[in-house]
Structure formats: structure tokens, C-alpha cells
Amino acid sequence: MKKNILIATGGSGGHIMPAIVFYNLLNKKFRSFISSDLRGLNYLNRKNYNPKVVKTPQIFNSYLLFPFKIILLLYLIIQSIIFLRRSKIDVVFSTGGYAPIPLCIASLILRKRLFIYEPNHVIGKSNKFFLPYCHKIFCHSHKIKLFPKKFKSKIVLIAPIVRDIFKKKRINNIKGLNLMIIGGSQGAKIFDKNFHQVIFKLSKKLNLKIIHQTNVKNVIFLKSFYNKCNIKNKVFSYSNNIFKTIKKCNFCITRGGSSTLAELFVSKIPFLVIPLKNSKDNHQLENAKFYKDKNCCWILDENNLDKKKLYFKLSNILLDKKKLTNKKKSLNNLNQNIDWNKQKKLILKELNEN
């Protein structure tokens, strides 16, 4: 008889995407459920996933409302206990963020087995809170910042979690430079402000096509600019099905979100990371360092993102084919060492233990 497992996730793309991967994997051996907050409905098709919506408040972002949030949290814990009992959940698997907190607490009250996934290279606050009580935590490295040493034995080491479609072979006969800019699910305003003029300058020296993912408000302006400059382009707002676009590029500029970096890594595309300087515990920089240490990418500090420094950095990378080739070799070698079937068996074994 199949066990029932709940995958509890936050509402950002960085939490949802791995949750979807785990759901699709675990649904073969478990009866799987998935939960998120309202933001998660942007990614989760109700017909395919039928997600449970948990409206967990951000507890510490307003001390004035703190007492009311605690009352709401207690209410959500009670609702979570009822849900876990009714659905006969055996295992709760959290991919982090604040949305899963009531369900994780409920799982502990009901003495259900709790597992955690940490996608970043700095442990998140909610994951850190549940570390003493969880059975295992899945990570991409033993060197996670702010990770308490006494719980290191709980780490199960796995390769970056990406959708299976990213593991497929890419187009290798791309002519010229197809440069992709990924601003993330919110679109990076600073990218839109500084990049288009630098791209125009680069286009005078390179056979260039630009693929620019931006905020929906900027699509018309950027497309018009590139067209006026006679630069081949594709400009679009955020899409969950970004693989079709990624597979057509051979260099990428991006933020340091864990899911995007993992997808670029598995797609074997060299990339330049400009970490969001205000990310919690500077986790985007630590995510980028993980791949830089493996010779997969470059890092540019957001504080150095004026047009001159950006142009210098990109020229230094893109006008020297040896540098791109060197990164591609590292990406190919590292991916060849990943046994995806072995990883799937490891995850299923850990979660299926009594």
C-alpha cells in the first residue's frame, strides 16, 4: 500500500520548481499531495496538482502585527492537523520558505516523519528551525552557511534539482552568440535599466541575438529598442516553460536564484551571475560561489553594475572564445559525473524508510 506524502512549499519560483520535481518523482511510489501559499497558484495547475493553499503570514516582518500573526499561525496549525489527519499523511516534505511552517509543526505534533530540502547554500530560517526535529535534510553541499555542525549527519547530498526536460540534449549548432538575460519571476529592474545600451555596444563587435526575460511592463520598450538597433531579439515576461528558450542560448546573465542556476548548470550553459544584494543572508552570492568554485560561471557585484564596468566584464568574457570553451568543458565534465537514476533511487529510499 502506498504511503501518503505531502510536499509543502513556499510560493516563490525557487521553492515551487523543486517541489514540482519532487512531486513528479515521488508520485510514482507515494500518493502525493502538494501545498503552497496563494503565490504558488501561479505555478501549480489545479487540475494536475490540486494544491492545498496555506495562507501563512510572514511572522517577523511587522512587529506591530506580531500578536495577530501568532493567533493566525495557531489557527493554521490546527487546520493543518485536521488536514494531515483527514488525508492520512504519513510523511511531510518541506522545500523551505515560511508557507510550510504550520504543516511542519502539525507533522511534529502528530509525530509524522519530516524531511527538508534546502535549495540554497545558506540555510533558510524555517529550515534551520526544523533541523533538530527533521529526519533528514537534502542539500547540494556539505558546506552550507549558517548550518549547525551538530546536525551535519542529517545531510543527504544530492545534485541540483531540476525538471527532467533540462536534462535533455540541447541544440549544439547555434550560430553566433545567443545571449540570454534572465531577470527572474519578478524581473530585475536594474537589468532593464543598464543592459540594453551595453548590448547595443556589444552588437557592433559580435554576431549577437538577445533573448531578454523581463518584467511584463518593460517588454514593449525593450523590444522596440532592440528592433531600432537592428538586434535580433526575443523579449518576454516570466514563463514557467523557459526550457524552450534556454536551450537556444549559449551564454546567460542571471540573478543567483537556486532554481535558475541549477537549470543553467544542467543545461551546460556558461553564465554570469549578478546576485541580488538584498537577498536574505546574501544567499544568492553563496549560490553563485558554489558554481564559480566549480569553474562554471562568473560573478559580478551589483554595486559594480554601471554601464562601463558591465561592458568591460562582458567584453572580457565574450570576445575571448577560450574563456567560454573552458567553462563549457567544466560544465560537461561535471554533468557527466551525475547519475540521475541513482539519485532518484537514493531520494526514494530515504523517504520510504520506516
Image (cartoon, rainbow, N blue to C red):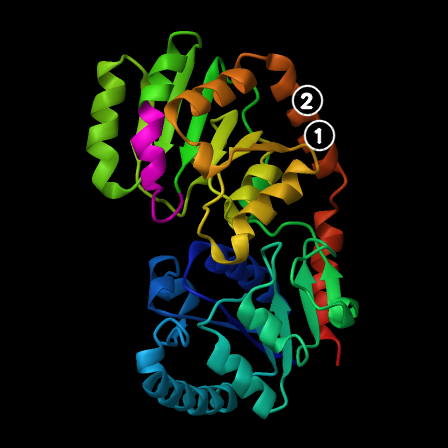
What quarter of the picture does the C terminus occupy? Answer: bottom right
Q: Which residues are magenta?
A: 184-196
**Image vertical order of residue 4 relative to residue 259, above or below:** below
**Element assignment for label 2:** helix
**Image vertical order of residue 50 relative to residue 209, above or below:** below
**Image vertical order of residue 187 relative to residue 28, above or below:** above
Tag 2–tag 1 contact (CB < 8 Å): yes
For residue 325, which quarter of the picture?
A: top right
Give the crowd class for mark 1: few <14, some 14-19, many >=20 residues within 10 Å. some
Q: Is any part of residue 30 visible from this angle?
A: no
Q: Which residue is the site of mark 1?
A: 330
Amino acid type of the residue that numbered disc 1 sits on in the rendered structure: Ser
**Image vertical order of residue 18 relative to residue 224, above or below:** below
Extreme-top residue of the structure:
205
Q: Assign the magenta stretch its main secondary structure.
A: helix
Give the crowd class for mark 2: few <14, some 14-19, many >=20 residues within 10 Å. few
Q: Which residue is the site of mark 2?
A: 326
Q: Position of residue 328 (x, y in %)?
A: 65, 26
Name the residue located 77 percent from the left edge and 72 percent from the top edge.
150
Residue 204 lies in the magenta stretch: no
Is residue 66 rendered to the left or right of residue 218?
A: right
Is residue 284 rendered to the left or right of residue 310?
A: right
Name the residue located 54 percent from the left edge and 64 percent from the top edge.
23
